[in-house]
Amino acid sequence: MLGLPPYMVTRAAAGGERDVNDLKISLTHFTDFVTSTPSGRVQAVRDAIRLRDSIDANRRSFDGKGFNPDFYKPMKLYLSKAVQGAPLETIESLLFADPRKQAAFRLCADGFHKFLAQQKVTWRGPGRKWEWSSGQLTVSVNPEIALRIDGNNWLLKLYFKERNLTKLPHRTKADLILHLLTAGSEEDETVGVLDLRRGAILALGKPVRDCELLLRGEAVSYLEIWKGLKAAAA
């Protein structure tokens, strides 16, 4: 998982119960859903519901404080400081705070430093956030960093996982992410997905045909599966 957890609710329905009308999910979770098998889609939504319930329980336990499900948050902080020239000895500790994360973090950090060594990179700032909505579903689009690379402005979504986005079906996922990134970019920006483990940027190639229609149809599918699972559990 990247960025936000796979769900966020913008408001509560009467009586404090969450309502599907308020459903907001992350860009990564939505594109994972779209490119999954039929059984994988159901499982993805089921996992999102379980995570929501877990987050809600922890928020109650911690009185709304101290619970952050973002696995890669320390890595994102490390990357921003590395681009801005912070000495490595002062930021290496970010990678080793949790033993469960060390192997994944080290692979991402090594790939990122390979990327930095290949071109002139300067920090423009954190990425912007915006929303894509279809019907009752809202997708939070959150490219994490804005960089200037060899004189060109880039707005980048970070990709931390092992799967190679240049190969199908994962290339389709990358293209869907890039389609949604393009909607919120500035005229002087190029959008991309930065594959950290490989130290490479994926830019938009041949557009997915009828991409917007595809995504709107998948939004309907997501909501129907969510409603069905919630009804079955009631």
Image (tube, grey):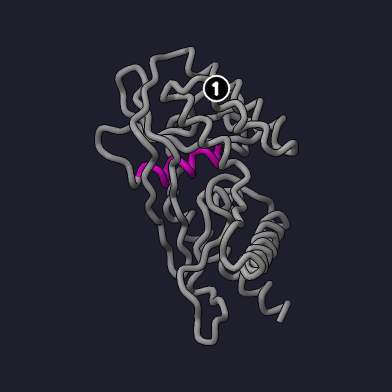
The residue type indicated by label 1 comes to Gly
Q: Quadrant of the C terminus?
A: bottom right
- Helix, strand or loop for the magenta stretch, by majority: helix
Label total for image: 1
The residue positioned farthest toward the top in the image shown: 118
Q: Is residue 155 above or below residue 234?
A: above
Residue drawn at x 34%, y 47% is 183
Residue drawn at x 56%, y 68% is 223
Which residue is nearer to you in this view: 211 or 41? 41
Q: Position of residue 124 (x, y in %)?
A: 33, 31
Residue 85, quarter of picture: top left
User: Start and end of the magenta stretch?
Assistant: 171-182
Question: Which residue, given by chain and number where applicable, does mark 1 sit on?
Answer: 199
**Residue 222 left/right relative to 215:** right
Q: Position of residue 221 (x, y in %)?
A: 57, 64
Residue drawn at x 57%, y 21% is 89
**Residue 49 visible in image:** no
Q: Indicate the secondary structure of the residue bearing disc 1.
A: loop
The residue positioned farthest toward the front in the image shown: 90
Q: Position of residue 218 (x, y in %)?
A: 53, 59
